[in-house]
Amino acid sequence: MLRRAPAAIIPRMITQPTNSPVELADRAGDGFAITLNWDRDGDGSLWVSVFHEDTGETFVVDAPRDSALDVFYHPFSYSLAHAA
């Protein structure tokens, strides 16, 4: 016996969350994929993600507003500075 759903049930629309980061720039080379990201809906922070395509390893470096592009182009230098 098939039952019909009550007529009062109205399907809800599914919306995308608005708090996902925005990718501002990306580049790839020598087995690395590098992205500059911005938390538009949160605190406005910027960071650079580095993904090594061969090993699957990833690391993230915070990117101050005044040097975000420099961090994007030289993430390894900034990761070493934060590790010391």
Image (cartoon, rainbow, N blue to C red):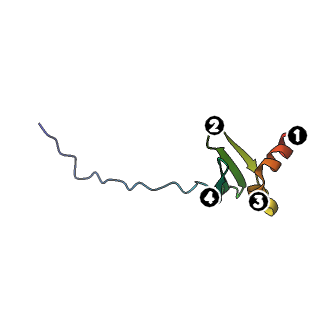
Residue at x 74%, y 57% (from the top left corner): 72
Query: What is the number of the mark on residue 23?
Result: 4
The residue beneath circle 1 is: 84
Q: Position of residue 16 (x, y in %)?
A: 48, 55
Pair 1/2: label in front: 2
Secondary structure, mark 1, is loop
User: In the rendered structure, which amino acid carries the disc numbered 1?
Assistant: Ala
Give yes or no for contact between labels 4 and 2 (Cβ–Cβ under 8 Å): no
Q: Is residue 40 visible?
A: no
N-term mark: 3 or 2 = 2
Dot 2 surroundings within 10 Å: few (below 14), some, or many (20 or more)? few
Give yes or no for contact between labels 1 and 2 (Cβ–Cβ under 8 Å): no
In-front residue for pair 21/31: 31
User: In the rendered structure, which amino acid carries the disc numbered 2?
Assistant: Thr
Specify the quadrant of the image occupied by residue 24: bottom right
The residue beneath circle 2 is: 55
Give yes or no for contact between labels 3 and 4 (Cβ–Cβ under 8 Å): no
Q: Is residue 48 visible?
A: yes
Secondary structure, mark 3, is helix
Label 3 to label 2, Cα distance in Å? 26 Å
In-front residue for pair 54/70: 54
Dot 4 surroundings within 10 Å: few (below 14), some, or many (20 or more)? some
Label 1 to label 2, Cα distance in Å? 24 Å
Q: Position of residue 57 (x, y in %)?
A: 65, 38
Query: What is the number of the mark on residue 68?
Result: 3
Label 4 to label 2, Cα distance in Å? 23 Å
Query: What is the number of the mark on residue 72?
Result: none
User: In the rendered structure, which amino acid carries the disc numbered 4?
Assistant: Glu
